[in-house]
Amino acid sequence: MPHALDTKAQGMALEAQKDYVFVPKVTRTGGVAVIEAVMVGTRKYLFVIPFSSIGGAGRTIETRKYTLAQGDPRQTVPALLAEEDMTVEALEELFCDVVEKIDGYALEIASFDRFKIVVGSGLFGWLKAGLYYKTGGKRGWSGMAVKGKANRQLLYDFYEDQLHPDAPNPYAANP
């Protein structure tokens, strides 16, 4: 018999900052393209779901707009998160499938050798602000810019217990 406080057993919607974290705009550079995307994070994954990209070389520039369920991901992703019958497991399965189809990313947090989120404050803190990770013994960090200090703080709070101990956030509001 399900516990009375088990919201998933009662069919209640996912809870932001408990079951997932949502960021309405991140920017990721890769190859010769700049990708703007929404990001959804669970305790296990970071999903980067693009809504636009611009890239090219020389005189050729290509812009691309992405859709998800015949709509802009900036509107469809929050709608999916608000569905009453959505579970964390169903969300992860859905977005793992989605990112394969639209050139997005599903980053498994357990695969990170190092993981840090820099909230950014002070005179030049915004220059370093963002989400960074290292995987597979690579020398450099990979990462993305996260728009808005409040969004970076949401990410930091959600993943605080998973951040790598040797990569602390020097800009945390409450060090």
Image (spheres, grey):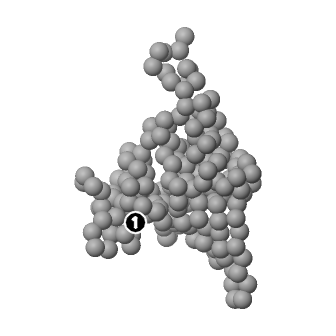
Who's the residue at 44% across and 41% down the image? 17
Residue 1 visible: yes
Residue 160, compared with residue 32, is above or below; it is above
Which residue lies under the disc numbered 1?
A: 129
Picture quadrant where residue 152 is located: bottom left
**Towards the viewer: 138 or 75:** 75
| Residue at 42% in and 47% down | 159
| Viewer-side residue, 170 vs 139 | 170
- Visible residue check, residue 107: no
Quadrant of the snapshot with the C terminus: bottom left
- The spot of residue 31 in percent (x, y) is 64, 74
Tell me: residue 122, above or below residue 108.
below
Instruction: Find residue 158 and report its image quarter.
Output: top left
In the image shown, does 122 or 45 lie closer to the viewer?
122
Can you give x and y, in whole percent of width and height, for residue 126 in the image?
A: 37, 69
Q: Quadrant location of the N terminus? A: top right
Among the 4 quarters of the image, the one containing residue 127: bottom left
